[in-house]
Amino acid sequence: MPKTAFSIYNASAGSGKTYTLVKEYLRILLTSPTDDAYRRILAITFTNKAVAEMKTRIILNLSDFAKDDPGPRAEMLMQVLNVETGLSLATIKDKSRAIIKNIIHNYAAFDISTIDKFTHKVIRAFAHDLNLPVTFEVSLETDLLLQEAVDAVIAKAGDDATMTSLLVDFSIDKTYNDKSWDVTHELF
């Protein structure tokens, strides 16, 4: 069966997605010819909590695999990886030692990220191509963003005929119904 360039796992909560992702990540690490394959793996999840969980599980599993007595949980996962990769348990142990040592010395390169962080990195990398200032900032202040959007819409009054007509008609409708002519609140 040919290898795919990427895998997507979509399942409900509690179905074992994190276990599967960690196992696949470990499989890629262990079958790589180098000990720094983690530098070339793109692992994305939804929340910071999930990022921390995945990173912790990967590090703990590699650490357990490297021990002389890995424990029953790690031993079971080693057996699964042995079957899936064809690597001997001794090879998994030795490779895990080398990988964990490499990660410790280059922890910043061991990156699992949220979708938000990843897209922010991509946008920042292409800021010039996207005609964005290099020092752009991302704002998560919903009320502030909405207020800026409302201000931008109202600022088009007088310049954009369609927008002016819509705002005037909306204001007239409001006054006709004994409401304030100010449309800012409703637009917000």
Image (cartoon, grey):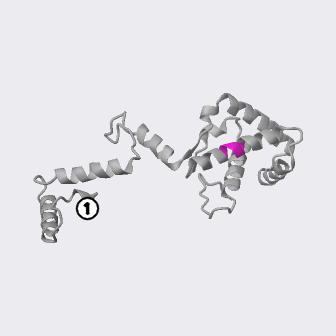
Image location of residue 92, percent across then percent down: 81, 42
- Compared across the picture, whether 9 is left or right of 75 comes to left
Residue 56 located within the stretch drawn in magenta: yes
Which residue is at 71% across, 38% downward?
Answer: 33
- Residue at x 76%, y 44% (from the top left corner): 61
Q: Is residue 28 above or below residue 169?
A: above
Left or right: 136 in relation to 114: left
Q: Quadrant of the N terminus?
A: bottom right
Looking at the rendering, which quadrant does residue 39 occupy?
top right
For residue 70, side relative to residue 61 (left or right)? right
Say whether residue 160 is left or right of residue 73: left
Q: Is 114 colored magenta in this rendering? A: no
- The local crowd at label 1, few if under 14, some if 14 to 19, many if 20 or more residues have their Cα within 10 Å, is few
Residue located beneath label 1 in the image: 186
Between residue 56 and residue 148, name the one nearer to us. 148
Query: Which of 57 and 121 lies nearest the eye of the viewer?
Result: 57
| Coordinates of residue 9 in the picture (x, y in percent) | 61, 59
Place residue 176 in its image quadrant.
bottom left
Residue 21 in the image: above or below residue 67: below
Q: Residue furthest bottom?
A: 177
State which quarter of the image contains the C terminus. Answer: bottom left
Q: Residue furthest front?
A: 178
| Residue in view at x 64 percent, y 32 percent | 107
Image point (20%, 59%), residue name: 183
Provide residue 100's location: percent of width, then percent of height: 73, 35
Amino acid type, label 1: Glu
Per the rendered image, the range of residues in magenta is: 54-58
Is disc 1 placed on a helix, strand or loop? helix
